[in-house]
C-alpha cells in the first residue's frame, strides 16, 4: 500500500467538501451580475450617478446618487446654449470669432467645432456647434455676444439655475472645463434639460445628428458639425425605442457623462448618466450605460 494513500484520500475529501461552496459562490456571482440592485439598476453600470425621468409626468423611474455633487464637464453647454437662445432675438445675426476667444481654449485643449478667428458666424450655427461637436469657441462667442464677456454671461447662467431651482448647481464657465466651484447634480441636470427642451430651437439642435452651416467669410462652402453622441454610439436603439439626442461630456475629474433624451412607445424620457470610468479614447461607457438603463423600461 502506498504510504501516501491516506493523505491523498484526506485531501480529496477536503476538495469534495469545498465543491458545494465554490458552486454557491459561482451562482451568487452570476445572480449578482444579472439581477438588478435595490434601486432597480444593473450592478454593472460604469456610471456612478444616474437619473431617469419620464417627461409626461416627471416621474422618476430610476435613480442612483442623483443628488450627489458631480462635475458636469460639457453638459454645461446645455445651460450656455439655453441662456444664449433666451437672450437672442435674431438667430441669423453673425458673431465674429476673435483670436482672444480661442487662444485660451487652445492652451487648455478644449474641443472646438472648427470655426476660425476672424470668422463671422450666425448665432444659430454657433448653437449647433456648441451642442453637437461640443465646440468651446461657439460657447465663448455666444457668451460674449449676449453679455459682453464670459463672467457676465456666467452670472446669467447662475441666475437661470436659481430660477430652475437647481440648488445643487454653480457655474464658473461656459464650456465646462474643470473647476472645483463648477458643479451640479444629476437631478439638477435633468431639470435643466427639461427646461431647455421647451425651447424649440434648442430641441431641434439637440436632436440633430449633423448640421451643415451656410457659407461664411472664411468657409465659403460652410462646415458640417456632427453629434458626438451619435458619432460614438454603437447603437442609438433599444427594444421599442431610441435615443433622440444627447450632450456628452468628459474631464478627468468628471468622468464620462451624458444628458440624453429618449423615446419609447410614444413616451419621452430624460436620462442623466455621470461619473463613468474611461476617457474620450475608451469605449463610450456613458452611452453604453444609457442604452443598458433604457432597455429596462417596461
Image (cartoon, rainbow, N blue to C red):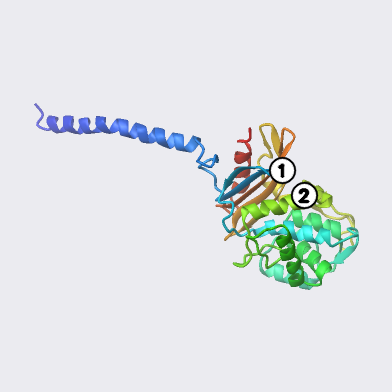
Instruction: Tell me if mark 2 has few (under 14), some (14-19) or many (20+) residues whose alpha carbon lies within 10 angstroms of its own.
Output: some
Above or below, 103 relative to 256: below
Above or below, 252 relative to 263: below
Ranked by sequence position, the earlier of labels 1 and 2 is: 1
The quarter of the displayed image where residue 292 is located: top right
> Which quarter of the rendered picture does the C terminus lie within?
top right
Spot occupied by residue 151 in the image (x, y as percentages of width and height): 73, 72
How many numbered marks, from 0 up?
2
Instruction: Tell me if mark 1 has few (under 14), some (14-19) or many (20+) residues whose alpha carbon lies within 10 angstroms of its own.
Output: some
Q: Is residue 159 left or right of residue 218?
A: left
> Which quarter of the rendered picture does the N terminus lie within?
top left
Above or below, 3 relative to 56: above
Distance in Å between CA atoms under marks 1 and 2: 10 Å
| Residue 80 or residue 100, whichever sits in front | 80
Residue 114 visible here: no
Spot occupied by residue 277 in the image (x, y as percentages of width and height): 55, 52
Q: Residue at x 85, y 56 (%)?
A: 124
Residue underneath mark 1: 55
Spot occupied by residue 186 in the image (x, y as percentages of width and height): 62, 53
Q: Residue at x 71, y 61 (%)?
A: 161
Residue 45 visible here: yes
Residue underneath mark 2: 197
Q: Is residue 22 left or right of residue 43?
A: left
| Residue 100 or residue 238, whichever sits in front | 238
| Residue 3 or residue 87, whichever sits in front | 87
Amino acid at each position: 500500500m502506498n504510504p501516501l494513500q491516506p493523505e491523498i484520500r484526506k485531501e480529496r475529501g477536503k476538495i469534495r467538501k469545498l465543491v458545494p461552496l465554490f458552486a454557491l459562490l459561482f451562482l451568487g456571482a452570476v445572480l449578482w451580475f444579472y439581477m438588478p440592485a435595490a434601486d432597480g439598476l444593473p450592478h454593472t453600470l460604469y456610471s456612478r450617478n444616474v437619473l431617469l425621468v419620464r417627461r409626461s409626468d416627471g416621474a422618476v423611474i430610476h435613480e442612483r446618487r442623483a443628488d450627489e455633487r458631480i462635475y458636469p464637464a460639457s453638459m454645461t453647454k446645455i445651460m450656455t446654449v439655453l441662456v444664449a437662445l433666451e437672450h437672442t432675438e435674431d438667430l441669423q445675426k453673425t458673431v465674429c470669432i476673435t483670436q482672444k476667444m480661442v487662444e485660451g481654449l487652445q492652451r487648455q485643449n478644449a474641443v472646438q467645432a472648427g470655426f476660425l478667428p476672424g470668422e463671422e458666424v450666425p448665432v444659430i450655427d454657433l448653437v449647433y456647434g456648441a451642442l453637437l461637436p461640443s465646440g468651446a469657441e461657439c460657447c465663448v462667442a455666444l457668451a460674449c455676444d449676449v453679455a459682453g464677456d464670459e463672467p457676465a454671461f456666467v452670472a446669467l447662467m447662475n441666475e437661470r439655475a436659481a430660477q430652475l431651482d437647481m440648488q445643487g448647481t454653480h457655474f464658473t464657465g461656459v464650456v465646462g472645463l474643470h473647476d472645483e466651484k463648477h458643479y451640479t447634480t444629476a437631478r439638477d441636470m435633468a431639470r435643466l434639460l427639461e427646461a431647455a427642451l421647451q425651447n424649440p430651437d434648442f430641441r431641434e439642435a439637440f436632436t440633430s445628428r449633423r448640421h451643415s452651416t451656410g457659407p461664411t467669410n472664411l468657409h465659403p462652402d460652410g462646415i458640417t458639425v456632427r453629434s458626438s453622441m451619435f458619432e460614438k454610439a454603437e447603437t442609438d436603439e433599444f427594444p421599442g425605442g431610441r435615443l433622440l439626442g444627447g450632450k456628452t461630456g468628459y474631464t478627468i475629474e468628471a468622468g464620462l457623462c451624458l444628458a440624453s433624451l429618449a423615446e419609447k412607445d410614444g413616451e419621452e424620457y430624460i436620462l442623466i448618466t455621470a461619473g463613468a470610468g474611461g476617457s474620450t479614447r475608451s469605449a463610450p461607457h456613458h452611452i453604453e450605460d444609457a442604452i443598458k438603463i433604457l432597455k429596462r423600461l417596461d
